[in-house]
Amino acid sequence: MTKQQSILGLLPEELTGLVKERHFPAYRAKQILGWIYKKNIFCLLEMPNLPQDFCKALAGFLKVLSLTCVKKHVSAQDKTIKYVFKTEDGNFLESVFIPQKGRFTVCLSSQAGCSFNCAFCASGSRGYKRNLTVAEIINQLLWIKKEHSNNKITNIVFMGMGEPLANYESVLKAIKIFNHPDTLCFGARRITISTCGLAPEISRLIKENLQVELSISLHAANDKLRDKLMPVNKIYPLRDLIAAAREYTKVTHRVVTFEYVLISGINDREQDAQELIRLLRTLKCKINLIPFNETENMQFRRVSPAQLNVFKDTLMKNGLKCTLRRSRGEDILAACGQLRLQLESAKNKAVTCNL
Ligand code: SAH
């Protein structure tokens, strides 16, 4: 039997091509996409108003979902919900639903595991498995969208597990599909790509002429510290990264966001703030300060609230635009990779579905 391909990996034009190849009218593709993306129906044989022979013919080689949701954790603190999905080849990945006043953000993973080994991040601690497919990326969003069908998803952020710019083609294709009028018509301006700093891919992204938001995980303002916290800095040091960010703001006229996770005694001192000011003061940018989410087996500690305020005030007094991201879902291990880590270390234990 041939392996079924997931419709979620296809641009509407590609699905139309497959439908026409089988001598069915092109408008049938649009109908299917309407059921999937607008009505959250994920079984080809359950789509009303489509002829049975057509549905059966398509179901022979196409399917919708490829991920299974194996766990769901709801934060008692702030109603953030973390989902763990399992791929068909047995990898785990995580996505998060974040409700905030009037906003509903979904945080997506782009890879199973991560190869960049940031010292403070749980995503890479079990190694890198593989890039996610376009269908697996879209599957995460659609599953969560169906669960929250009363609330319209307002924002998508690629801040889950993995490095989105290391899975460039699939992430961009997924964004083009989200964007398409026959699917979700989801505006690129409401989609954020977060990168650990792949300078060449940032330059490549500039040429795409997309309206996506770019976030750069900085976390240190000198190469010595950044080399330690984020080994990717040895390949693309700050000089290259800041040059790519500057080019991005010049060509796109957009503001770039720098994420800065504050870790007690490591990057939260006065001298760190001063270095950050020197590095970024001539850039069209915003800094998002994030208190470190403490992880098991990690020596790092979260910045104190007092130090966080001192750090923020120093940046703001020196003219840097600064926001403070409240950590979400700490009680459910919502920082990158934390829940997957817990699941995988429960060796051989059956993973149950909590849905
Ligand atoms: N690879 C991409 C996207 C995934 S990480 C990137 O590096 O940007 C999303 C954000 O969460 C990054 O800024 C990352 O540095 C941060 N992060 C990872 N572990 C964290 C933790 N324990 N506490 C707070 N933020 C964390």
Image (cartoon, grey):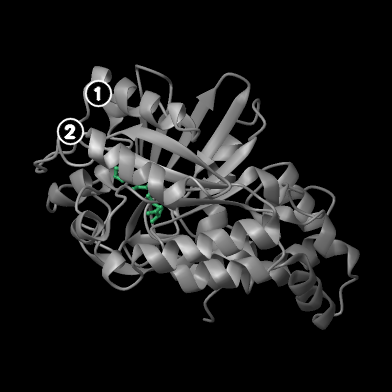
**Percent of width and height locating residue 235:** 31, 73
Ligand 1 closer than 8 Å to the CB at disc 1?
no
**Percent of width and height locating residue 122:** 23, 49
> For residue 307, which numbered disc appears in the image?
1
Q: What kind of residue is marked 2?
A: Ser
Task: Quadrant for the C terminus, please.
Answer: top left
**Residue in the image at 29% along x and 48% along y:** 337
Query: Is residue 36 visible to the viewer in this orientation of the structure?
Result: yes
Query: Is residue 352 visible to the viewer in this orientation of the structure?
Result: no
**Residue in the image at 52% along x and 49% along y:** 282
In this picture, residue 272 sits left or right of residue 245:
left
| Disc 2 packing (10 Å; few <14; some 14–19; many ≥20) | some
> For residue 264, which numbered disc appears in the image?
2
The image quarter in which residue 144 lies: top right
Near-viewer residue (335 or 306): 306
Residues tagged 2 and 1 counted as in contact (Cβ below 8 A): yes
SS at badge 1: helix
Near-viewer residue (327 or 28): 327
Near-viewer residue (45 or 82): 82
**How much space separates mark 2 and mark 1, taking CA atoms?**
9 Å
Q: What kind of residue is marked 1?
A: Gln
The image quarter in which residue 63 lies: bottom right
**Residue in the image at 40% along x and 62% along y:** 111
In this picture, residue 45 sits left or right of residue 301:
right
In this picture, residue 65 sits left or right of residue 68:
right
**Percent of width and height locating residue 65:** 54, 57
> For residue 191, which numbered disc appears in the image?
none
